[in-house]
Image: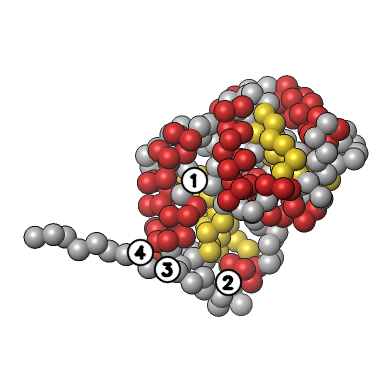
């Protein structure tokens, strides 16, 4: 039986932000990963406006992945840009790390918190929780106030801010599981796992883009196609 081919689509145009080698390290038996970036769109996503600007390019890459025989797509952004329209145009499994991560985190503890990059993104996560039916499980959304493209400028400082906000989420907000609210935080989970937050169950990957990967390969398998509701085509008027 062949591996299930999952493509990770980064909805930004900043080349090199997501390295294929990092994704390959997340492969496991039965799942192989490939990567694509959009051709036009924002350099990073830190607002609803930038998320909207990324959708056309994201949909084009998802359509291309389906033509190339890819089995499933993961959108590499915690804003899940284009998730619902992607499911309209594609018969593949399409996952958004935020929606997926929230559902998994809700099974790991009574309540979970999201630690994201910028304060202005807080309403977006609250809206996603509401649309996913998980508002009652969301303890809080906190931010470290570090722009996406500055995350790796000083990783030690980024880690300190994550630990500070993570501790508040646990001790003040009652979170029992934590999700990083930006896929750019890949690799920053170690600080939260080294006993610094002993009372919290840090989300097993704590890395948004890794969250969907441990799901069973059967979920992605072409033998279980997702039902697609066809888009209604409007006739042109004469």
First along the sequence among labels 3 and 1: 1
Which of 2 and 190 lies nearest the eye of the viewer? 190
Query: Is label 3 or label 2 in front?
Result: 3
Residue tagged 3: 229
Gap between marks 2 and 1, in whole Å?
23 Å
Residue tagged 2: 221
Gap between marks 3 and 4, in whole Å?
6 Å
At 81% from the left and 50% from the top, the residue drawn is 110
**Label 1 crowd bin: few (<14), some (14–19), many (20+), radius 10 Å:** many
Determine whether the residue tagged by mark 1 lies in a helix, strand or loop: loop
Gap between marks 3 and 1, in whole Å?
19 Å
Q: Taking 63 as reference, is 162 left or right?
A: right
**Colouring used for the render:** secondary structure
Residue tagged 4: 231
> Which disc number belongs to residue 81?
1
Gap between marks 1 and 4, in whole Å?
19 Å
Determine whether the residue tagged by mark 4 lies in a helix, strand or loop: loop
Determine whether the residue tagged by mark 2 lies in a helix, strand or loop: loop
Instruction: Classify 175 as above or below 149.
Output: below
**Label 2 crowd bin: few (<14), some (14–19), many (20+), radius 10 Å:** many
Query: Is label 2 or label 4 in front?
Result: 4
Which of 138 and 4 lies nearest the eye of the viewer? 138
Instruction: Find out whether the residues at labels 3 and 2 contact each other: C-beta distance under 8 Å.
Output: no
> Which disc number belongs to residue 53?
none
Query: Is label 2 or label 1 in front?
Result: 1
């Amino acid at each position: 039986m062949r591996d299930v081919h999952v493509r990770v689509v980064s909805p930004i145009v900043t080349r090199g932000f997501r390295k294929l080698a990092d994704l390959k390290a997340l492969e496991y038996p039965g799942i192989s990963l490939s990567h694509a970036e959009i051709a036009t769109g924002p350099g990073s996503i830190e607002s609803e406006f930038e998320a909207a600007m990324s959708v056309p390019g994201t949909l084009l890459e998802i359509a291309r992945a389906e033509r190339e025989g890819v089995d499933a797509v993961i959108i590499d952004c915690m804003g899940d840009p284009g998730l619902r329209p992607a499911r309209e145009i594609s018969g593949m499994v399409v996952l958004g790390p935020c929606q997926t991560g929230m559902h998994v985190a809700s099974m790991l503890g009574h309540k979970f918190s999201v630690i994201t990059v910028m304060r202005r993104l807080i309403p977006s996560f609250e809206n996603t929780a509401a649309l996913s039916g998980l508002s009652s499980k969301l303890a809080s959304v906190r931010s470290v106030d570090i722009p996406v493209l500055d995350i790796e400028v000083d990783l030690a400082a980024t880690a300190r801010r994550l630990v500070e906000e993570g501790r508040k989420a646990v001790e003040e907000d009652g979170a029992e599981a934590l999700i990083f609210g930006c896929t750019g935080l890949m690799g920053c989970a170690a600080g939260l796992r080294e006993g610094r937050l002993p009372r919290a169950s840090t989300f097993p990957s704590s890395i948004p883009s890794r969250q969907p990967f441990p799901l069973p390969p059967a979920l992605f398998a072409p033998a279980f196609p997702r039902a697609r509701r066809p888009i209604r085509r409007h006739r042109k008027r004469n």
